[in-house]
Image (cartoon, helix red, strand yellow):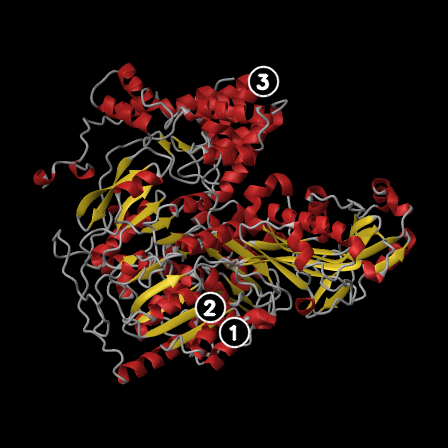
Amino acid sequence: MSAKAISEQTGKDFLYKHICTTAAIQNRFCYANVTAETDWKRLVQDHPWLLTERLVVKPDQLIKRRGKLGLVGVNLDLEGVKEWLQTRLMKETTVGKAKGILKNFLIEPFVAHKQEEEFYVCIYATREGDYMLFHHEGGVDVGDVDSKALKLLVGVDEKISADTVKSQLLTHAPADKKEMLISFLVGLFNMYEDLYFTYLEINPLVVTKDGVYVLDMAAKIDATADYLCKAKWGDVEFPPPFGREAYPEEAYIADLDAKSGASLKLTLLNPRGRIWTMVAGGGASVVYSDTICDLGGVNELANYGEYSGAPSEQQTYDYAKTILSLMTREKHPNGKVLIIGGSIANFTNVAATFKGIVRAIKDYQDPLKEHEVTIFVRRGGPNYQEGLRVMGEVGKTTGIPIHVFGTETHMTAIVGMALGHRPIATQPRVAAHTANFLLNTSGGTTTPASSRSASFSEVKTGAENSSAQKTRAGLPPAKSTTLFSNHTKAIVWGMQTRAVQGMLDFDYVCSRQEPSVAAMVYPFTGDHKQKFYWGHKEILLPVYKNMADAMKKHPEVDVLISFASLRSAYDSTIETMQYPQIRTMAIIAEGIPEALTRKIIKMAEEKGVTIIGPATVGGIKPGCFKIGNTGGMLDNILASKLYRPGSVAYVSRSGGMSNELNNIISRTTDGVYEGVAIGGDRYPGSVFMDHILRYQDTPGVKMIVVLGEIGGNEEYKICKGIKEGRITKPVVCWCIGTCATLFSSEVQFGHAGACANQASETALAKNKALEEAGAFVPKSFDELGDVIKSVYDNLVAKGVILPAKEVPPPTVPMDYSWARELGLIRKPASFMTSICDERGQELIYAGMPITEVFKSEIGLGGTLGLLWFQTPTLLPRYACQFIEMCLMVTADHGPAVSGAHNTIVCARAGKDLISSLTSGLLTIGDRFGGALDAAAKQFSKAFDSGMLPMEFVNKMKKDGKLIMGIGHRVKSINNPDMRVQILKDFVKQHFPAAQLLDYALEVEKITTSKKPNLILNVDGFIGVAFVDLLRNCGGHYLDQKRLKQGLYRHPWDDISYVLPEHMTM
């Protein structure tokens, strides 16, 4: 999530450190924190003013209206404070619906003042800018400030001024205090912006002749701006909402999440509950929680959480074992249920993630049986059939009741089964693997004829994109009604080869004449060509280092799909919008700071550019175009009939749920006309109404489906559009998040925007308003498909929709790597090796795991003996031992890397040892082997210049340079390289100092928060460790000969022959 509440102490600390104002702010840093473990003697030593001042004491646990609740002790001496705390500290209290323990208190100096010296000020973020509210009467009885306070909107990219503050906010303020208030309010707003606050309230703000006193303060900051604000924020702790304990398991999962490019979330609601969930997807996780609560399970719901973004097997295992550990600590008289659910994945390999869950189930099989746990599984997506098969098998082998369902079962049907509200369905026999859809039997290489180009009810238009190019004099360029056609061309920012291949396969199956991707932009390499498939045929797409060249050489492109990271997405998006040919942009990255997103939105509005995202999978227009990974792999594209247009258009926030909508709509109607996932952030680039109005004005769309969610007010604009007659087509709408009002404490769901800040933003209120406005609103998500079918059938009966005859779609050949993953093919290996295996959890030397090599203390001689002769021979000081250790862990990198590859090929060609060795050594450079030296130079230069680790990372990013010694193809923060771990432990124990290593490890924390495999690798570690050391104090050749391998010739089918067009076979 982005906006996170901080403690009052943290908020005041930020304010006192960073506000710039001429107003005299009193009592700076005068606060003391008290918990049950506080040593009062030490506290008084650290804060001597506690003995001389009258004091105020209050809990600092995100509790609103503490004064009204009698939770503020005023005008006390220190003994009075202790006495006041005796009846409250570590005592349970109720605040609203939440019960919690008062455990964290703040003591501050008491400020004697008059009522007329109290003021109220609040700043909060909205889509259009930041509002500052000011009321000349503050304090406990301020009342409804929204109706009382004066408001000032400071628009996005605008600056606050003293004149506007004076004229719009201070009309009722005392004249003798205006100048002091102006300076303070301007400074407060600038600090709010500079430190990426999203909410800041001070009540009361006391202004006397002596200066300004900040008495009570509440604040939220945008946690995604950590990479920008780390130097100013420091390490921030985000306390849980009052009424919910901070469990160590939640902190553990949060730590995993921070180290991962995937999303891993866990909130414990009731650890004694019998209903546990492990749901894939931010939107799906909310839907499952809604359904559990709808069926009466709110008091037994133990947790909320989600995993998404293609977590690795190890990450999924760690997540699953945490949940299984929690649910098997206390028995329930009725047994327990675990719901492993999810929508249809767009790109996550379901079988791979299920491997981690299966490992955890096997590890916990005895406690699961002892606690009478029944497991219900429903999932879809890439390779889901294999995942479900493995899950079913583990149920049979362990004796744990596991019920498994795929896409043929409604997503939330398993909830009713788990809670006993519906019978457990007979599990249908599913296809063995994804491939059943995909194998091409025709053998042809040409683009197939169209199976169905349009719905019969669609009105065909000529120049679909013409409106995008029209500009009205004096007004921003008009946005197009039609974003995509079957002639749309796109540029993809980022080296996302899998996503691009998916787009090309979609194009092919839709019978497009040309690929929809014209080029790619990747600033970390030089201009080159990248290989892809167009059906059976191999094609080359250009990759450009800079955007300008791509735009200049491809003027036909009007769509950009950005896979830029959250750190570079803003800069690359702003750069893209300098080119007027781009009319639509999809921003995939999640975690872009909200302030930057709003700047993107403002520029897009000025330039007439439609933004889809951020934090989205994209969108799809069947038969025409798809963004990146939208719609999943080809089996789902075909199963959901996305290769040709239907009559139903939808818009959703969730990317995973958009794929579920594809499935629901394909089963209940003639299919999808167009679908867009606008993204889960608080401020998506385009909103529901932007797309609903496009659909309203598109003749081929006959009905509209909207999947809204808790948080924000966009759904009320749909109500207004229906009432005013701007929307006349049938709208089926459901807002997820209905469970939120049933929880006793606030729960932040998977999407950053899924949080209600007022009653009108709840899902229940929005569903009610939509129904009253005339939208078709189901009673629950369970009934969404039924309502869609009812509306569709009615339109067919009226003759509004004329379903077209189905024709089998064309087929696309399967990629070799995916066929191998599914076990459909086998291929003889080109090489044999007997000395090293780097594929598993840890490196193996001649059958001995690297951890065993060190446990056996065989030394350097023994290691070389292992690698060269496969028999360790033992060889019997601090620096020497470290050098030997470095040689041990880098003695071999496996047969797959370039140096070893060349040595093997030369040996098999009959060359001598020296020739073979030098052949491998000649490959050493920046890309292979040379990272050790370069890492030592880069880290030393940054450290010696005094740069903070975050500044170093940002500078390298800005300069377009890779950080040498960072990154690994296989290992990650969650699957660490044991070599690095062992060396790290040795250095920490034996080196007198390791300043550069400590610096490099801080850099690693930053890089792994972006992507888990951006770790400090063994080359980088050795490079920096050798610098610390100095500042502070032929195996594959023999192996190939032993195995008697013959002359090697590379197979033709593994080579792309780039020939003139007339010579192509």
Q: Quadrant of residue 145?
A: bottom right
Q: Which sits earlier in the primary sequence, circle 3 or circle 1?
A: 1
Amino acid, disc 1: Lys
Q: Which sits earlier in the primary sequence, circle 1 or circle 2?
A: 2
Task: Tell me the mark number nearer the camera, choosing from 3 and 2.
Answer: 2
Q: Tell me the SS state at disc 3.
A: helix
Task: Tell me the mark number nearer the camera, choosing from 3 and 1.
Answer: 1
Residue 37 appears anywhere in the view: no
Gap in angstroms between the C-alphas marked 3 and 2: 59 Å
Viewer-nearest residue: 281 or 610: 610
> Does residue 347 appear to the left or right of 114 in the view shown?
left
Give the x, y percent position of residue 740: 57, 69
Amino acid, disc 2: Gly
Give the x, y percent position of residue 184: 72, 49
From this view, report whether residue 396 is shown above or below residue 702. above
Q: Are marks 1 and 2 in contact (CB under 8 Å)?
A: yes
From this view, report whether residue 1025 is shown above or below residue 383. above
The residue pinned by badge 3 equals 1031
Q: Tell me the SS state at disc 1.
A: helix
The residue pinned by badge 1 equals 766
Amino acid, disc 3: Arg
Q: Tell me the SS state at disc 2.
A: strand
